[in-house]
Structures are given as C-alpha cells and as structure tokens.
C-alpha cells in the first residue's frame, strides 16, 4: 500500500522520479557526502543490521498503526527494513542523494525535505522515528516539541542517538553532531517536550571500549583522520573473525533483552520509545 502523502503535507510536489520534494529547503548540519559514505557500508555493516533488527521489533511491539514516518532517514536503510516487515513507511530525508538511494531500495513513498519544510499538518503522523538525527539539531528541545506537534494524539516516537560525552571524537565533529546523550538526559528531554517514555535502553555495549580506544583517544591527541568510505567499510566489518564473532554474540544478547523489553545497561547508542501526551498532561 502506498501512503497518501498529500493528505498529511501541503508543501510537496512530485518530481519525474516519483520523489516528493519540498518547494523550499533549509540547510542541515550533515556533511554533503555523508549519505553516500553510509550507503557504501549499510548493507554489510553489523551496526546497521543490528538497528534493523531492534527498531522494527520495537515498532511492531508499540505501534499497532501500520504507517510509519522515518524522519531524516538517510538512505532508507531502516525504512526498507520496516517496509519488508509489512509496515507502510514514508522516508523523509532532506538530502537528495539519500532520497534517491531510498528510492533505489524500492521504497514506495520518499519525501526529499525536512520535517518542517514539507508542510506536514499538526496531529498528522501516527508514528515516527528519528534515528541518529537529534544530535544534528542545534535546538533539540525545539525539534522534539515540533515532533509532538506533528504526531497524532498518543502517537509514538522512536529515537536513537549516540551515547556518552566521553566518547566524543573527530567522527562527531565531521558528522555535524552537537552533542551525545545518556538515557537520563534523553528521557528528561522527551518528558520536557511532552512525551511519556515507554521504553529506553542503551545499544552496542561491546563498542564502548573500541570507540574510546580507536576514535576518542586518537582524536584527543589529534591523530584521528577524517573518516572516508574506505575507513568506514573497515570499521563496519567488525574486525577479524574472532572479534566479529564476539560482536555477533553481544548483539544477539542485546536483541534478546530488548525483545523482552529489558534495558541494556550501557552502550555507545541510546534508544527510546515515547508516547505523545496532551500538552496539559
């Protein structure tokens, strides 16, 4: 089923490729080549594969509504995973490369726009996800409040963000991040924006030591280089056979815990599911 996007957004026109494009576009804090770098690793990366298991699992648990808006969804990696599981998914991605990559993956509805520029009406989104998006927003509180405005009453928001300020590295600078989070900070921000947190956890517990050793420390002593497609591919393969096997076991353990809605106690990312509350709640 294809979502009728015109019923939810007023500032979109469909181009010859079938992508819905906003008439006006604003700048975003993301490197121009970022989507292409990610696109080169997504299908073979243990990191993306883990998110593609965990997120649809939570969506199917908390969102009975079959329509999902993937806000700032990059190349449509998660959108595609959701669509394969029968969820009618709309990719909303401001970057032209990401939007076209999403279309090439077979996504049925692709919007090349920011959430605000698309002209979505209030209370129009039944469920939405912002996956590694919030850290790119200067005023994260304002953005969360805008999501509250656009979601339907009791609509569900799914979110992932990078964790722990002590893991900051040149990777964050290059990616256009403004901050890294903790679960408590993320929950506080969601509550302040009018959401009730239904579930939260860390992800990628096994990656905290290697990120600190191979990204953070080299960045502190200024020997960390700007990431490239080649370096990204190397990191996302998971190292040698022994380390890849260890990572696979750790991630399987995380998936098992989250399936039971049990929290992973620490990790390099945070994930949360929150429900929109009335403004006077």
Image (tube, helix red, strand yellow):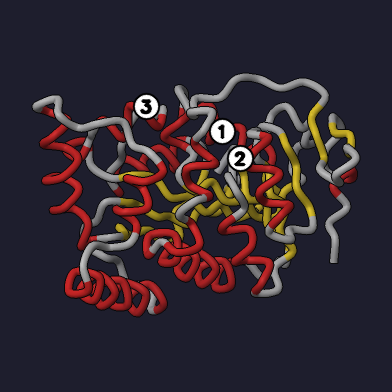
Residue 215 image position (x, y, % from top left):
19, 40
Q: Please give the residue where the numbered disc 2 appears in the rendered image.
A: 148
Q: Residue drawn at (38%, 60%), measured in percent from left and top?
A: 47
Q: Please give the residue where the numbered disc 1 appears in the rendered image.
A: 145
Residue 145 image position (x, y, % from top left):
56, 33
Instruction: Decide which of 260, 16 is in the foreground and name it.
Output: 16
Q: Which of pointers 2 and 3 lies earlier in the amino acid sequence?
A: 2
Q: Nearer the viewer, mark 1 or mark 3?
A: 3
Residue located farthest toward the front when viewing the structure as drawn: 230
Instruction: Decide which of 23, 68 is in the foreground and name it.
Output: 23
Residue 25 image position (x, y, % from top left):
71, 22
- SS for tag 3? loop
Q: Residue drawn at (66%, 32%), measured in percent from left and top?
A: 114
Between the C-alphas of marks 1 and 2, the distance is 5 Å
Asked which quadrant contains residue 237, the reply is: bottom left
Instruction: Decide which of 73, 75 is in the foreground and name it.
Output: 75
Q: Residue drawn at (68%, 35%), measured in percent from left and top?
A: 96
Instruction: Decide which of 34, 180 is in the foreground and name it.
Output: 34
Q: Which of pointers 1 and 3 lies earlier in the amino acid sequence?
A: 1
- SS for tag 2? helix
Q: Mark 1 and mark 2 in contact? Answer it, CB < 8 Å.
A: yes
Q: Please give the residue where the numbered disc 3 appears in the rendered image.
A: 178
């Amino acid at each position: 089923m294809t979502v009728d996007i015109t019923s939810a957004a007023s500032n979109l026109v469909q181009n010859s490729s079938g992508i819905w494009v906003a008439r006006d576009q604003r700048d975003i804090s993301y490197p121009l080549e970022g989507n292409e770098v990610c696109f080169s690793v997504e299908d073979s990366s243990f990191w993306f594969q883990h998110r593609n298991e965990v997120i649809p699992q939570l969506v199917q648990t908390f969102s009975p509504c079959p329509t999902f808006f993937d806000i700032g969804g990059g190349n449509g990696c998660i959108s595609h995973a959701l669509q394969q599981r029968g969820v009618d998914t709309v990719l909303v991605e401001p970057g032209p490369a990401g939007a076209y990559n999403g279309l090439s993956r077979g996504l049925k509805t692709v919007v090349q726009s920011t959430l605000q520029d698309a002209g979505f009406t209030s209370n129009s989104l039944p469920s939405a996800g912002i996956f590694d998006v919030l850290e790119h927003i200067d005023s994260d509180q304002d953005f969360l409040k805008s999501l509250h405005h656009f979601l339907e009453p009791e609509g569900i928001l799914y979110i992932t963000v990078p964790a722990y300020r002590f893991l900051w590295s040149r990777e964050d600078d290059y990616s256009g991040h403004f901050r890294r989070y903790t679960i408590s900070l993320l929950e506080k921000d969601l509550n302040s924006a009018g959401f009730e947190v239904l579930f939260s956890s860390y992800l990628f517990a096994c990656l905290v030591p290697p990120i600190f050793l191979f990204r953070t420390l080299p960045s502190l002593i200024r020997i960390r280089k700007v990431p490239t497609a080649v370096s990204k591919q190397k990191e996302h393969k998971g190292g040698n056979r022994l380390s890849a096997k260890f990572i696979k076991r750790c991630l399987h353990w995380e998936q098992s815990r989250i399936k039971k809605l049990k929290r992973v106690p620490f990790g390099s990312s945070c994930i949360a599911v929150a429900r929109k509350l009335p403004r006077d709640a």
